[in-house]
């Protein structure tokens, strides 16, 4: 069903050119080619889909092994080792007959390679298995790919500049630098370091007082203490939760359908992530809870303790994929999409593999047979059972206790009484209106109409129906249309309804968690879908991990149905296997992502793809060291942070030496700290912090996003009347909360975040872009959020520094940049304030404040100061972390 | 939310790929408000703002842009201006004369009322006279004297049907092809299919009224599930004319210029202290480019250099027509500069004359008749009418019977989506053509019905696009403007 995958082939075919085997760099003409390394990857892309995979053998031909090629199919042998001219395979390809139809042609370079291989006698790297089943073949060579071998802890290398080594990380990085004739840049100064640390660990700028304290701290332990303090800050969890939420594909809406309905309880998962990170919950536990928290709770998930509620909330991770199954026009298709998107999230988050490519066919580059995809899918199907599907509302789990439930029932009884009263009154009012309308009609019509009206619709005669149609004022009188006849009556009923609602509102608030659970005893059989099409089921498969990650002789760690648990135990066993510390990918993928957040690029530059098409690690030994270190430290993320931020690598200046510029212009070797643009949240939160408006309230329901008058998405409570925006409803300071608490509705990304590369979750975002485009400049110049906050910033400066322009400039610099302006800057800024006040005289600025009122500012000095503040917020020194 | 695009043979395909989110190109193409990203992408590449191309093709995303794309077959139209008459102008009093309304007392059949409480069966003969106009002799109401002068340029459809009797749903039908919310609007489809010819202006512009937004508000220019690049960009009647492009009123001109000068100095200094970091000069350049884009938009919206005769033609000298005339004139200026689709909106329920129609309908006509006709004349004079479709119409018409039967000053007409009128001009529509007919009383279309799907298929056809081919794949479904519904290109109204 995954058409995108099929369409991709043309692109994929081109890509083969870029795989090492074909790139030529390792294969000069004389190089001995082997089937495994050079030929199979080509055939996988172009041929084996119909000749060998999943039992397909067009023309009786199977091209998965060399001996199968020699054996050939209905038309005889496919190759004649030593003689490309006599090889039928070459003939058909060169005649343009294969691959057939619209499939992309095999590039010339690849055909040439095939010819050369055959001319060399069609060698293999090793002996081939004598017997093959219909399933895929994972060769030893494939298992030897770096990412599939378990990490081994390497010893930190010796370096020349040993005095620069603060942590083992430094040794690994420095050794590579020295090999290239480079070394570390000098340590950055404390002002730079504190701003860097604040944004990296908290996503917020340091306050001037904090900068001062750190800069003036004489203790050699000052840096370490600062790191400890930041790691203990509650804002740390918010910052790093956001990174994980990208990977999890966090969204406050279901996506998929046009309506993109809100997910009312997704935020419980967001809060779970923040709390877990703040507690430094070991990552192995963090992963187990997210994949299988429900399997650690005894069903039937009622009267939950807070720990149980937490475990269930954790499985929100598996409920983040778009889920349109409540309203989708094609439910089976929509269900299938939920499962496949969930697998994409899990695999890109934890495995760093594009497993999704194997949904329709064997993975063309990585040794992931289609069947393995379904083995993985089988792990999740007891919870995502396509045959016994549960829609998002049906999957919610109430946090009500028994006492809550009883109280609510009592209150419901009272409300029902009022409902009855209202219905009674409604009847009376309808009858009154009916009589009024009848009175306007000729006498002889009244009785027949009255009778017709009061006869239940199903029992009306044909004549009665026609009569009512002829007199629509009577015929179409309903509780719904009553307001058109008698506004007062309708209002009276509305009031009664409101009273009932008021009573209902006194029920204890019922909260829910969005969890993934199984129905005990319900164990579906997972099957392979032919070409990924759920309407074409094929052979059944057992649950299990990808086989390439499982050593040849290791038992499958995932049970079909664990007798010790009420649930199947599949996810629990899988999660425990992933976090056993011996999995080749999980720890590497996790540490790589952490590294990426500090240095702008992962050690593997494609954190979502450690496979053949992904990047190779720039520092493979460092990656393994960090992965091993993470496991050894008891999976403590905070310890990993400490290890990284106390390193010399991290503490370098951003200054680029001329040698570095020449030898390593992309800074892959990290001869200096990269300059990084603030990401969307850090930018918005940074503006809030500097303007003094930041509201640090934690957790809870998201701050809503709505479309403003021109369709731009801004914070606000939607207040529409037939689509037209009504007055703004105050948010009472919630609009100043951190961006992690802003509602993440897929169809309504907050404008100011979106402009700075806030991701769309489709279904998740393992790596963000950092773009530089004019729309950002325009936002910084003209967007209402920036203009308003520049005014708040100016008010703060005036409050804290008084009316003297020199003092104001100094304060503004300290707040925005964490440093004082020099003489030149002061002179420019003071002169700017004077000239700006001149041209602003007589103008009026409109500022929207937290009570959502608009205030008019006429003082030109105030406006000029706000303009200065806006310049600072839009300047590179603010937008980049040095 | 968007997935892949497939287009049939004959329409140039786009790069297909897995849906993804995180690559640079994608973000270039999905700015929040969508000022001609074509210009952006192109200029950025020209200026070397972008890093070198990635070392391998991106598997995980496809790119969307506003580059001009060739249509599937030879087009008649290149641009469109839609004058969106929200509320439902009374076809019975403007476009579709029905002498029978004066002949009989009551409507003989079943009437589809929206408001039963104030319904009646009594017919309301039009209080206004109709006259034959132009060489074609098209019958139009005396309330539209200016339109009468361009009768030979327009196609008048008297048999429009959407069949959903309330504003919101009928608006969706005409603007997006279906009554359900969340779908892309016509302007989004056109810019998705054809891109834009302008490098410095938005491809799809929404010119809103200074009053309240029309029913459905911002949904009227929504991109639905098409990439947000194809959302309409609002030009407001007040500063900032284009939010985020233009500064608020108090910073306009000199203050913003001085601020940018200071910013330039600070950035320059910062750059000198951080040599070799390529992002920094790129960002400085992005500010310069932003300023140029402001200038281009400013120039397009500035009507002060238009001749006196032109201003008069559009009624800009008259308080009654000034606002609507100005927006019609701006629409022309935008089209001249390469904008693909402009929609000009009346304010909320401007034509929804449930009661007091005798007063309110003439007032509404007074505001829009002259500018609408002026637009057709002006486009023709400039040689643009051949390639520019002008559309005039709303989501419904009115009923032949009286609503609020409470005396001549109070009478009005209820909704009618079963038969109503709208007109089109230019871009390949036949001039002086009347098409289709309603029943004797003007309630229901009976002859040559034109549904919203037919209308959309016909429009796309004039733009060189097949309504079944221009598609967007989403949730494994090929979505089209006409939503897979049976419909046809109404060839009879084409020149």
Image (cartoon, coloured by chain):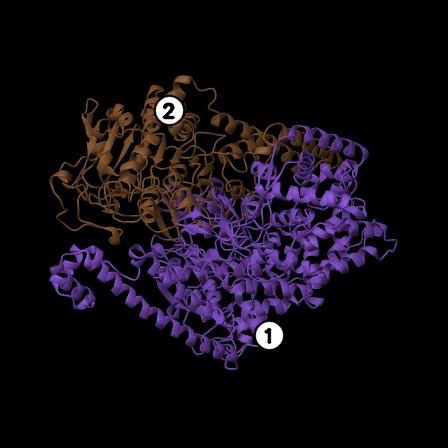
Residue tagged by mark 1? Answer: A307
Residue A553, compared with residue B472, is above or below; it is below
Q: Can you give x and y, in whole percent of width and height, for residue A359 in the image?
A: 44, 58
Which quadrant: the N terminus of chain A?
Answer: bottom left
Residue A183: image quadrant is: top right
Residue tagged by mark 2? Answer: B314
Task: Return the chain for callout 1.
Answer: A
Q: Can you give x and y, in whole percent of width and height, for residue A508 in the image?
A: 51, 72
Residue A626, compared with residue A15, is above or below; it is below
In-front residue for pair B65/A443: A443
Q: Can you give x and y, in whole percent of width and height, for residue B453 in the image?
A: 28, 43
Residue found at the very far bottom of the displayed protein: A564
What color does chain A have in the rendering? purple
In-front residue for pair A42/A658: A658
Q: Can you give x and y, in whole percent of width and height, for residue A438 in the image?
A: 19, 59
Which quadrant: the C terminus of chain A?
Answer: top right
Residue B128: image quadrant is: top left
Instruction: State which chain is coloured brown.
Output: B
**Do the residues at discs 2 and 1 belong to one chain?**
no
> Is residue A867 visible from the viewing direction of this image?
yes
Residue A808: image quadrant is: top right
Of the numbered discs in the image, which one, if any, rests on residue B180? none
Residue A706, compared with residue A813, is above or below; it is below
Question: In this image, B191 relative to A865: left or right?
Answer: left
Mark 2 element type: loop
Mark 1 element type: helix
> Is residue A30 visible from the viewing direction of this image?
no
Task: Return the chain for callout 2.
Answer: B
Residue at image coords 64%, 65%: A275
């Amino acid at each position: 069903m995954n058409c995108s995958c099929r369409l991709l082939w043309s692109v994929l075919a081109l890509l083969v050119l870029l795989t090492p085997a074909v790139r030529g760099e390792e294969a000069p003409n004389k190089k001995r080619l082997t089937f495994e390394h050079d030929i199979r990857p080509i055939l996988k892309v172009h041929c084996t889909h119909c000749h060998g995979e999943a039992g397909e053998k067009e023309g009786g031909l199977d091209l998965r092994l060399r001996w199968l090629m020699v054996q050939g199919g209905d038309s005889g042998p496919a190759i004649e080792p030593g003689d490309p001219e006599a090889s039928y395979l070459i003939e058909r390809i060169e005649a343009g007959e294969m691959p057939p139809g619209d499939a992309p042609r095999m590039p010339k370079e690849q055909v040439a390679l095939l010819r050369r291989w055959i001319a060399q006698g069609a060698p293999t790297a090793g002996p081939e298995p004598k017997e093959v089943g219909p399933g895929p073949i994972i060769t030893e060579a494939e298992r030897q790919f770096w990412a599939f071998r378990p990490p081994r802890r390497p010893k930190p290398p010796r370096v020349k500049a040993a005095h620069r080594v603060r942590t083992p990380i430094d040794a690994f990085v420095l050794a590579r630098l020295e090999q290239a004739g480079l070394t570390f840049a000098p340590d950055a100064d404390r002002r730079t370091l504190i701003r860097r640390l604040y944004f990296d660990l908290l996503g917020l700028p340091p306050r001037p007082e904090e900068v001062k304290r750190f800069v003036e701290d004489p203790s050699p332990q000052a840096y370490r203490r600062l790191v400890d303090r930041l790691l203990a800050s509650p804002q740390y969890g918010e910052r790093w939760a956001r990174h994980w939420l990208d990977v999890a594909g966090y969204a406050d809406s279901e996506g998929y359908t046009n309506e993109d309905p809100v997910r009312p309880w997704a935020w419980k998962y967001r809060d779970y992530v923040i709390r877990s990170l703040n507690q430094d919950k070991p990552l192995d536990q963090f992963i187990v809870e997210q994949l299988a928290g429900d399997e650690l709770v005894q069903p039937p998930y009622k009267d939950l303790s807070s720990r149980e509620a937490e475990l269930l909330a954790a499985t929100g991770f598996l409920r983040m994929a778009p889920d349109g199954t409540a309203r989708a026009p094609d439910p089976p298709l929509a269900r299938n999409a939920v499962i496949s998107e969930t697998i994409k999230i899990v695999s890109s988050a934890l495995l760093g593999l594009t497993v999704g490519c194997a949904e329709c066919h064997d993975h063309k580059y990585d040794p992931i047979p289609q069947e393995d995809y379904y083995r993985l899918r089988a792990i999740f199907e007891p919870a995502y059972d396509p045959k016994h599907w549960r829609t998002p509302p049906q999957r919610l789990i109430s946090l009500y206790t028994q006492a809550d439930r009883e109280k609510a029932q009592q209150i419901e009884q009272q409300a029902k009484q009022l409902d009855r009263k209202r219905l009674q009154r409604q009847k009376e009012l309808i009858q009154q209106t009916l009589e009024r309308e009848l009175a306007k009609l000729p006498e002889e019509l009244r009785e027949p109409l009255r009778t017709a009206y009061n006869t239940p619709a199903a029992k009306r005669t044909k004549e009665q129906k026609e009569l009512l149609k002829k007199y629509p004022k009577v015929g179409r009188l309903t509780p719904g249309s009553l307001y058109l006849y008698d506004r007062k009556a309708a209002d009276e009923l509305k009031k009664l309804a409101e009273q009932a609602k008021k009573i209902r509102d006194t029920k204890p608030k019922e909260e829910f968690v969005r969890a993934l659970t199984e129905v005990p005893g319900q164990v579906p059989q997972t099957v392979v879908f032919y070409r990924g099409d759920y309407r074409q089921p094929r052979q059944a498969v057992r649950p299990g991990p990808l086989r390439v990650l499982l050593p040849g002789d290791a038992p499958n760690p995932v049970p079909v149905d664990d007798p010790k648990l009420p649930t199947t135990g599949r996810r629990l066993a899988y999660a425990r296997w992933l976090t056993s510390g011996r999995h080749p990918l999980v720890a590497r993928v996790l540490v790589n992502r952490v590294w990426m957040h500090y240095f702008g690029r992962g050690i593997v530059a494609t954190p979502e793809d450690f496979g053949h098409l992904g990047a190779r690690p720039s520092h493979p030994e460092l990656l393994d060291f960090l992965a091993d270190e993470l496991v050894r430290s008891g999976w403590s993320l905070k310890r990993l942070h400490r290890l990284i931020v106390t390193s010399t690598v991290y503490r370098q200046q951003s200054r680029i030496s001329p040698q570095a510029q020449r030898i390593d212009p992309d800074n892959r070797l990290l001869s200096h700290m990269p300059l990084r643009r603030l990401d969307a949240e850090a930018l918005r939160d940074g503006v809030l912090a500097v303007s003094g408006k930041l509201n640090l309230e934690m957790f809870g329901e998201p701050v809503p996003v709505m479309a403003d008058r021109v369709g731009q998405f801004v914070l606000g409570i939607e207040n529409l009347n037939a689509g037209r925006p009504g007055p703004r409803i105050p948010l009472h300071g919630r609009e100043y909360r951190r961006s992690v608490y802003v509602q993440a509705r897929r169809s309504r990304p907050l404008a100011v975040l979106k402009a700075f590369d806030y991701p769309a979750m489709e279904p998740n975002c393992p790596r963000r872009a950092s773009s530089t485009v004019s729309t950002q400049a325009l936002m910084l110049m003209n967007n209402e959020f920036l203009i308003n906050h520049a005014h708040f910033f100016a008010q703060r400066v005036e409050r804290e520094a008084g009316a003297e322009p020199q003092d104001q400039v100094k304060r503004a610099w300290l707040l925005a940049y964490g440093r004082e302006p020099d003489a030149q800057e002061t002179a420019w800024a003071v002169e700017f304030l004077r000239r700006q006040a001149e041209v602003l005289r007589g103008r009026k600025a409109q500022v929207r404040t937290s009570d959502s009122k608009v205030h008019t500012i006429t003082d030109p000095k105030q406006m000029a100061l706000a303009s200065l503040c806006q310049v600072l917020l839009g300047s590179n020194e603010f937008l980049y972390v040095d | 939310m968007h997935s892949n695009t497939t287009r049939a043979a004959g329409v140039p395909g786009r790069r297909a790929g897995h849906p993804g989110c995180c690559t640079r190109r994608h973000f270039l193409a999905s700015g929040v408000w969508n000022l001609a990203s074509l210009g952006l992408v192109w200029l950025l590449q020209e200026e070397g703002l972008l890093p070198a191309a990635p070392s391998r093709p991106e598997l995980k995303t496809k790119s969307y842009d506003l580059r001009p794309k060739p249509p599937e077959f030879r087009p008649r139209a290149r641009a469109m201006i839609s004058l969106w008459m929200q509320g439902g102008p009374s076809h019975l009093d403007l476009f579709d004369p029905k002498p029978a309304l004066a002949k009989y007392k009551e409507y003989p059949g079943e009437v589809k009322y929206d408001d039963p409480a104030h319904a009646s069966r009594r017919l309301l003969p039009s209080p206004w006279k109709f006259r034959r106009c132009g060489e074609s002799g098209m019958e139009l109401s005396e309330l539209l004297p200016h339109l009468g002068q361009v009768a030979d340029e327009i196609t008048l459809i008297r048999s429009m049907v959407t069949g959903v009797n309330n504003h919101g749903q009928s608006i969706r039908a005409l603007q997006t092809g279906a009554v359900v919310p969340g779908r892309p609007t016509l302007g989004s489809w056109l810019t998705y299919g054809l891109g834009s010819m302008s490098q410095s202006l938005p491809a799809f512009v929404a010119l809103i009224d200074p009053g309240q937004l029309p029913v459905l508000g911002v949904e009227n220019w929504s991109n639905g599930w098409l990439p947000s690049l194809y959302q309409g960009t609002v030009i407001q009647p007040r500063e900032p004319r284009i939010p985020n492009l233009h500064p608020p009123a108090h910073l306009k001109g000199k203050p913003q210029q001085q601020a940018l000068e200071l910013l330039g100095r600070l950035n320059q200094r910062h750059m000198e202290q951080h040599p070799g970091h390529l992002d920094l000069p790129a960002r400085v350049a992005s500010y310069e480019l932003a300023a140029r884009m402001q200038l281009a938009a400013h120039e397009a919206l500035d009507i002060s250099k238009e001749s006196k005769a032109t201003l008069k033609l559009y009624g800009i000298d008259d308080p009654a027509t000034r606002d609507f005339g100005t927006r019609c004139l701006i629409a022309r200026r935008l089209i001249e500069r390469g904008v693909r689709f402009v929609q000009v909106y009346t304010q909320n329920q401007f034509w929804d004359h449930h009661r007091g129609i005798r007063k309110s309908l003439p007032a509404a006509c007074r505001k829009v008749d002259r500018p609408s006709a002026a637009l057709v004349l002006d486009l023709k004079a400039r040689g643009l009418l051949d390639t520019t479709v002008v559309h005039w119409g709303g989501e419904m018409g009115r009923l032949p019977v009286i609503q609020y039967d409470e005396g001549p000053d109070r009478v009005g007409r209820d909704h009618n989506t079963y038969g109503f009128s709208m007109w089109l001009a230019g871009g390949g529509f036949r001039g002086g053509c009347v098409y289709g007919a309603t029943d004797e009383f003007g309630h229901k279309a009976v002859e040559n019905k034109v549904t919203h799907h037919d209308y959309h298929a016909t429009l796309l056809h004039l733009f060189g696009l097949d309504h079944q081919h221009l598609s967007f794949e989403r949730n494994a479904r090929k979505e089209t403007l006409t939503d897979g519904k049976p419909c046809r290109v109404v060839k009879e109204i084409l020149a």
